[in-house]
């Protein structure tokens, strides 16, 4: 029998927003696009493949950390947690958390990838029959309404994967402030943050030898062709991830391999030879640097866990 599939509350984007943002982002002198557009159904599937790659250390390091520190993390988070997960791709991390927590009360996954959200919610609702599963399809970088049934409970935001690194520092500050407003006083945040390390390790993680990250990045152009009647020539662009030491961030770039003009709907976008589109940034923090940023957003650091190599950190912050 099992539970009925949970309804997805929909505050997601439509293709008009993609068209508008893409054309605007490619019309300025420095071409760039919002990283969220990398995650359509195919992009989300490719990202899951990235997480399995030998060179891509963040996922397995964070999972190892969650497993190793599960009891300590559960103690820090407290009983009857209502876990609001910001960007709920794969379910492996939330399972570790739910299994460790003492009588978790609710799970509220929030994600832009509608199909994956619905499917994962259905699976988790069936597996954890005592848990109330309330999925929300939304761009979680903007405020969205929380279901009223979470009022007054032990609200814990969960933001794993170091996705905070994909925001610019100012955006990260805004985001941390808005999460704090969302969980309210008495709430808390468990967040995964990738740490600064040998740039060779970083470059390898974002320029993997199997080319999965390249396919993930180029999928943005394929998506524009699929959804927007654009005519990107996939052979005329190449992926490269570059580490900017001063900014402490990886930049995901798509380089034009020749001078060309691309049509997106009615718009015509010129590219010079070697010009690139910045499709995503991935900031790396120090533990102190991240805690200082969180403090500026009003959070108080309660606990921090890192792996032995100091590749990755998990922070529990109090609103
Ligand atoms: C989702 N996010 C944390 C990934 C990262 O590492 O910045 C996205 C990614 N892009 C390329 N590889 C992984």
Image (tube, helix red, strand yellow):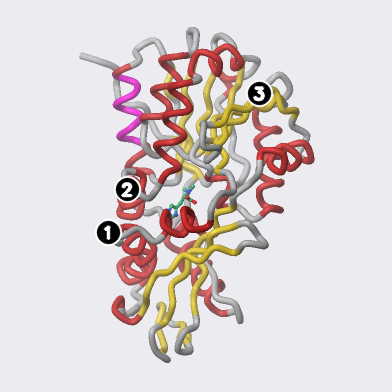
Q: Which mark is residue 53?
A: 2
Residue stretch rendered in magenta on the structure? 118-126
Q: Is residue 233 above or below residue 253?
A: below
User: Badge 3: how crowded within 10 Å, few (<14), some, or many (20+)?
Assistant: some
Question: Which residue is at 30% across, 18% downward?
Answer: 127
Q: Is label 1's Cβ within 8 Å of ligand 1?
A: no
**Place of residue 278 in the rendered image (x, y in percent of width and height, measured from the top left):** 52, 69
Q: Is residue 215 left or right of residue 285?
A: left
- Which secondary structure, mark 1? loop
Magenta span has 235?
Answer: no
Q: Considering only order in the chain, which callout, 3 or 2, is on the residue closer to the N terminus?
A: 2
Q: Considering only order in the chain, which callout, 1 or 3, is on the residue closer to the N terminus?
A: 1
Question: Which residue is at 52% across, 76% downward?
Answer: 26
* Contact between labelled residues 2 and 1, with CB atoms less than 8 Å apart: yes
Q: Nearer the viewer, residue 6 or 211?
A: 211
Query: Which residue does the numbered mark 3 point to in the structure image?
Result: 303
**Place of residue 213 in the rendered image (x, y in percent of width and height, measured from the top left):** 36, 59
Q: Is residue 16 above or below residue 99?
A: below
Query: Which residue does the numbered mark 1 point to in the structure image?
Result: 210
């Amino acid at each position: 029998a099992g539970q009925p599939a949970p309804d997805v509350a929909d505050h997601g984007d439509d293709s008009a927003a993609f068209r508008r943002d893409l054309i605007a982002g490619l019309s300025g002198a420095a071409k760039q696009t919002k990283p969220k557009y990398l995650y359509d159904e195919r992009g989300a599937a490719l990202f899951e493949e990235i997480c399995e790659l030998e060179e891509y250390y963040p996922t397995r390091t964070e999972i190892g950390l969650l497993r190793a520190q599960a009891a300590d993390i559960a103690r820090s988070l407290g009983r009857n947690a209502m876990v609001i997960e910001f960007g709920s791709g794969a379910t492996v991390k939330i399972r570790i958390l739910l299994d460790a927590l003492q009588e978790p009360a609710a799970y509220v996954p929030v994600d832009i990838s509608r199909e994956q959200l619905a499917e994962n919610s259905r699976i988790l609702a069936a597996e954890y029959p005592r848990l109330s599963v309330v999925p929300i399809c939304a761009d979680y970088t903007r405020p969205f309404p929380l279901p009223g049934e979470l009022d007054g409970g032990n609200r814990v935001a969960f933001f794993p994967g170091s996705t905070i690194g994909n925001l610019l520092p100012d955006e990260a500050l805004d985001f941390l402030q808005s999460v704090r407003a969302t969980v309210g006083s008495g709430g808390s945040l468990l967040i995964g943050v990738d740490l600064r390390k040998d740039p060779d390790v970083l470059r390898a993680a974002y320029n993997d030898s199997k080319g999965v990250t390249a396919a993930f990045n180029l999928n943005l152009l394929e998506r524009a062709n699929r959804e927007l009647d654009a005519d990107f020539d996939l052979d005329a662009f190449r992926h490269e991830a570059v580490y900017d030491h001063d900014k402490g961030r990886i930049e995901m770039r798509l380089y034009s391999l020749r001078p060309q003009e691309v049509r997106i709907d009615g718009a015509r976008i010129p590219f010079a030879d070697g010009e690139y589109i910045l499709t995503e940034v991935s900031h790396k923090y120090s533990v102190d640097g991240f805690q200082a940023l969180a403090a500026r957003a009003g959070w108080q650091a309660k606990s921090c866990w890192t792996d032995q190599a100091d590749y990755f950190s998990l922070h529990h912050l109090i609103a």
